[in-house]
Image (cartoon, grey):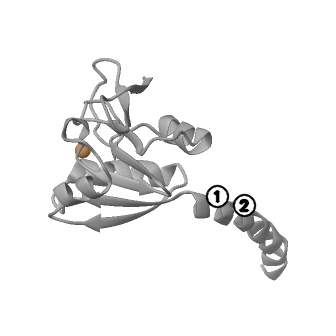
Amino acid sequence: MIRALLILLPVALGLNVPAHAAEMTKAATMYKNPQCGCCTGHAEYLRRHGYKVKVVETHDLVGIKKRYGVPEKLEGCHTLVIGKYVVEGHVPIKHIERLLTEKPAIKGISLPGMPEGSPGMGGPKRGPFTIYEIAPGQPKTFAVD
Ligand SMILES: [Cu+2]
């Protein structure tokens, strides 16, 4: 038993270091209404992909979206803040990763509305998702998925 622990301990510690470093860069804050279940679904999805998600429940999502520069037509059900970026709605992980890797000069990205089949929403996917850039001016497409 003790021998097993001694063997496993360095392995556990060795695995902890990169995991912790990854968590540091993947810390996110989610602003959501207390009643929103699909928001929780998206938070759990992000956690499964290694994000450390702090959930802040608020009745002032309008104020939050205003603060982070999310225009009305790009609003989703929750607002995620990761580093200097905002991620609005049920955005699939690969686009969040691309945003964080490429670091474009925009405020963030959004999958507006709550399309069926998007992460955290469940149900069948009924068509391609258009993920938009959050930036001043007319919304530009960040990705089609
Ligand atoms: Cu939702």
Percent x, y of residue 132: 36, 31
Percent x, y of residue 41: 32, 49
Residue 53 image-quadrant placement: bottom left
* Three-letter amino acid code of the residue under disc 1: Ala
Label 1 near label 2: C-beta < 8 Å? yes
Q: Nearer the viewer, residue 110 or 44?
A: 110
Residue 76 image-quadrant placement: top left
Percent x, y of residue 38: 25, 47
Q: Which residue is mark 1?
A: 22
Q: Nearer the viewer, residue 85 or 52?
A: 85
Horizontal side of 105 relative to 125 (left or right) equals right
Q: Which residue is mark 2?
A: 18
Percent x, y of residue 22: 64, 58
Q: CA distance from mark 2 to mark 1?
A: 6 Å
Query: How many marks do you count on the picture?
Result: 2
Horizontal side of 59 relative to 133 (left or right) equals left
* Three-letter amino acid code of the residue under disc 2: Pro
| Quarter containing the N terminus | bottom right
